[in-house]
Image: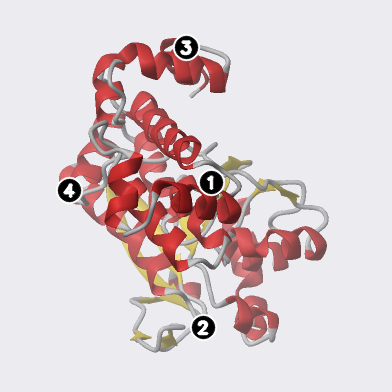
Amino acid sequence: MAPTTIAFVLFPHVHLEDLAGPAQVFYEASNLGNGNFKTLFASTGGMVASSQGLALAPQAILRDLSLRKGDMVCVPGVDFKSFLEGKIDAAIEETREWMLEQQKKGIYIASICTGALILGQMGLLDRVSCTCHWKCLAYMKERFPKARVLDTRLYVFDKGIFTSAGMTSGIDMALALVERWRNPLLAAKVAQEMVINVRRAETKSQQNIFLDFKNHFNPEVYKAQEILANRLDAGFTIEDLARQLNMSNRHLSRLFRRHTGHTVQTYRDNLRLEHGEQLLLHTERSVKEIAVACGFANARQFSRLWLRKKGCTPGEFRKFENSVI
């Protein structure tokens, strides 16, 4: 099988993480899959300054690239403020015709994070389902009304165009493409090599309960949520949490509810169910093993809470989701 070329197109003010994560996935896939992928980096010409200040020297000039049907052009995200100020407009205009030509040739087009804004400005997202970083979704809907912008997706594949949400979701999308174009085993090997425990599904929301502490400004509750996220084990009680924070149970409960809208127990249950969902979707562990890993005393306790919250058993959930995926 001829290798699939992944051409990363670098625009001014590119974000390093948006570039490095997916590039590493395809690099590892090539190493572990006998040269399945070839990565290269291109620009309209010359050095490209990243938004983090590191200058990048692309290997190729866009007009000199010769891509085949089935290859992919990937646009990593750029600094949103710079995009709004028009600092990338000239490079977008210079690249537009070349990108449209690639699409006509049957070459896949992808974006990471705010790279979707570049595709939108080129007209590539008209009547295409897509996503972007959560901070840019409202802007994207207003600026590109013909695009079908989806709010609660980590990545979207539609009409040969692949878009992903913010930052690390580019890694999830790249792993999904390795799985789609090659096989699940290779994707799993790449994830293991990169020390990624779970590849998130495309339908996973950009919002994450493990990061919900950003919704308020109380440092004591921040700390409580951080401890809870790292102590899902059944032996760690709410009394232990209060003691670790040097508070009474009553004061902790009152403070936690005021700033999060949840009781400590409800919040911890939601954390455990979130973790359980990932294990159900992406591991072969039994429900009993997952219950223990999520901090439940037994599988019955886990299943009872899951049924109350989700309206089905963990086994039914796993069977349905796997059939959809």
- Other residues around mark 1 within 10 Å, as few (<14) / some (14–19) / many (≥20): many
Q: Amino acid at mark 4?
A: Glu
3 and 1 marks in contact (CB < 8 Å) = no
Q: Amino acid at mark 1?
A: Tyr
Kindly report the distance in space between the C-alpha atoms of the residues bearing marks 3 and 4: 33 Å
Residue 308's quadrant in the figure?
top right
Secondary structure beneath label 3: loop
First in sequence: mark 2 or mark 3? 2
Q: Is residue 152 above or below residue 119?
A: above
First in sequence: mark 1 or mark 2? 2
2 and 3 marks in contact (CB < 8 Å) = no
**Residue beneath label 3, please?**
313
* Residue 193, numbered circle: 4
Secondary structure beneath label 1: strand
- Other residues around mark 4 within 10 Å, as few (<14) / some (14–19) / many (≥20): few
First in sequence: mark 4 or mark 2? 2
Q: Nearer the viewer, mark 4 or mark 2?
A: 4
- Closest to the observer, 99 or 143: 143
Q: Nearer the viewer, mark 3 or mark 1?
A: 3
- Closest to the observer, 128 or 216: 216
Q: Amino acid at mark 3?
A: Thr
**Is residue 101 shown left or right of residue 123?**
left
Looking at the picture, how far across and down is residue 109, in whole percent?
54, 54
**Residue beneath label 2, please?**
12
- Other residues around mark 2 within 10 Å, as few (<14) / some (14–19) / many (≥20): many
